[in-house]
Amino acid sequence: MSDTIYIKSKSEIEIMRQAGRITAGARSIARQAVAAGVTTRQIDKYVHEFIVKSGAKATFLGYAGFPASACVSVNDEVIHGIPGKRVIRDGDIVSLDVGATFKGMVGDCAGTFPCGEISEEAKNLIAVTRQSFFEGLHYAREGYRISDIGGAIQDYVESHGYSVVREYVGHGVGHQMHEAPEVPNYRVDRGIGRRANPRLVKGMTIAVEPMVNVGGYAVRTLDNGWTVVTADGSLSAHYENTILITDGEPEILTMAEDL
């Protein structure tokens, strides 16, 4: 990934709005498919069909070799769950991450949703993860730094006794799914460590995506080389939207009405 931050033109932003609507629609389709007895591969099929029908391309399919159009991660799976024969059961929580490319511009979003009746802990985890995104969104404004977003997310999550994954972060998005800058979900001191901490400016488009664990923040990758799980086996949730930095309120480009 290049270190160059691409400021989007008005025409590029309009295309990203369209890409964002398609991506948000794909997330809604996936959410509606979460039910006991459904396989993760079936959800992926619905996502792929919706994106193609909408005149877009499934960004994830083939990306660095990923074999599906959606990431479907269940319970202790944090991100990058590969759809397959796994059957979703009552009590599971299912993280759905989707991306769509429309006229060369990318939308990226995710959410974690319940299957049937889930535990109170799982309900709270999902709610805290989602709200942590909006806590960070308060600082997605011109003049603030990337770390202001992450710091707000971290503070909110930790105030509820949960932990924020460190090894995977948000990112710029636009012509590519992963562009500069990285967007950590935790506080980064300026000039310290390997992650940059630029100021936000109008025309930046970034994907903010807190990944939150009930237990510790440590994770590991399964033998398939993709699926990331919590190291301690605790539940994990994920929430993401693509946002546009403006000269006022940030604009969520992937916000469906029911999410």
Image (cartoon, rainbow, N blue to C red):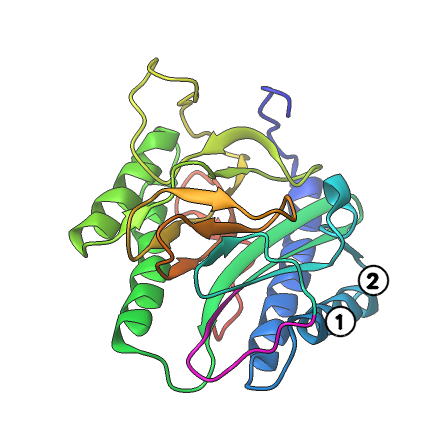
- The relative height of residue 17 versus residue 75 in the rendered view (above or below) is above
How would you classify the magenta stretch by its main secondary structure?
loop
Furthest toward the front, the residue is 223
Quadrant of the rendered image containing residue 129: bottom left
Residue at (82%, 65%) from the top-left corner?
52
Residue 144 in view here = no
Residue for badge 1: 45
Q: Residue at the spot x=45%, y=48% of the render? A: 209
Q: Nearer the viewer, residue 86 or 33?
A: 86
Camera-nearest residue between 229 and 124: 229
Q: Please state the total of marks drawn on the protein image.
A: 2
User: How far across and how far down the image is residue 175, in percent?
Assistant: 71, 37
The quadrant in which the N terminus is found is top right
- The residue pinned by badge 2 equals 55
Disc assigned to residue 16: none
- The residue that appears at 38% across and 86% down in the rendered structure is 117
Query: In this picture, which residue range is highlighted in magenta?
Result: 85-95
Amino acid carrying mark 2 in the image: Gly
Q: Could you tell me residue 99's position as x and y percent?
A: 66, 54
When the figure is inspected, residue 84 is found, relative to residue 203, above or below; the finding is below
Q: Is residue 178 magenta?
A: no
Q: Assess whether residue 87 is covered by the magenta stretch.
A: yes
Q: Is residue 223 left or right of residue 165?
A: right
User: Mark 1 belongs to which amino acid?
Assistant: Lys
Residue 145 in view (yes/no)? yes
Of callouts 1 and 2, the N-terminal one: 1
Classed neighbour count for the residue bearing mark 2: other residues with Cα under 10 Å, few (<14), some (14–19), many (≥20): some
Mark 1 lies on a secondary structure that is: helix
